[in-house]
Amino acid sequence: MNEETTKKGGIKDNWIVRNLVLAAILLVLLVAGSYAGLSILTHHGQELDVPDLTNMKVHEAEYTAKVEGLRTEVVDSVYIRRMGRGLVYSQNPKPGSKVKKGRKIRLTINSVNPKKVMMPNLVGYSMRQAKAELGSRGLVLGKLIYVSDMATNNVLRQLLKNREIQPGTLIETGTAIDLAVGLNPEDNQTYVPNVIGLKYMRAVDVVHDNSLNIKSLRFDESVKSYSDSLDAVVYRQGPEGSKAPILIGSDVTLYLSVDPAKTIMKK
């Protein structure tokens, strides 16, 4: 009797153990399956390099991103005069970033229709005041044309493509305006600033602030887009920065690059 009862109890105990083991195995499989499914849905561990979509048309950028398993969305626009209209100006995340498959790349494009502004009246302003006014309206200082006058750097005329432009004229943002400014023979010298190590736009500003003209901007082969040009740094200039006086209105040539081997230099 006791032996039979013990035997039946052992069978019962084994059945319970087997079910517990089976339940544990099923639980492990369920957890593992859920984790695997979640990994597939979230592309766990799968990272892609964001392609460079700048300077592409929107449909080209969309196709390029799609091939890489990514998506695009146009979120903003700017107007860059020297860049092709409708092209991608910038993107977020940046090219080369690591992202998961399916990530949306937000694009800023160069506007197809440029914004227009009214030409201000700069006559009577100092050259620096005129430059600041142009900048506030999205216009650009072009060439400084010096003519004999009692007041050096006093704006005498404002020109667009060698023709006088009247105040109130509607022109596209980004347009370069030349200024005819005075030059007193007794106050006609300046100095060449050292702009090595400065970015493109800042270097141009410094040259203009010293009453000099930009003769040429020489971008090397590392500068492949307008966006690159904004990040380009001056690695050489001619003439070099000097404390020796030079005639106001003289020309300066800047050499620019985004190549670290050239741009990591001491001023």
Image (cartoon, rainbow, N blue to C red):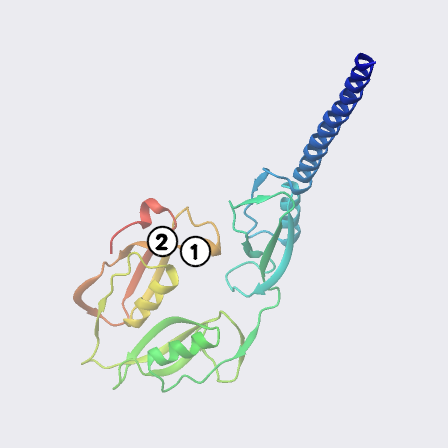
Q: Do the residues under discs 1 and 2 have CB atoms within 8 angstroms?
A: yes
Looking at the picture, does residue 112 appear above or below residue 14? below
> Helix, strand or loop at disc 1?
helix
The image position of residue 20, as x and y in percent, is 74, 27
Q: Is 234 left, or right, of 114 in this rendering?
A: left
Q: How many marks?
A: 2
Q: Identify the disc placed on residue 256.
A: 2
- Direction left: furthest residue: 244
Q: Is 80 or 184 nearer to us in this picture?
A: 80
Q: Considering the numbered disc 2 on the image, is that residue within a helix, a strand or a loop?
A: strand
| Residue at 53% across, 75% down | 171
Pick whichever, 114 or 159, lies toward us: 114
Q: Which residue is drawn at 71% across and 33% down?
A: 33
Q: Assign the C terminus to one quadrant of the image.
A: bottom left
Label for residue 92?
none
Q: Name the spot of residue 199 as percent of width and height, x first.
A: 36, 59
Residue 186 x, y percent position in the rendering: 18, 81
Give the camera-side residue of 258 and 66: 66
Label 1 sits on residue? 229
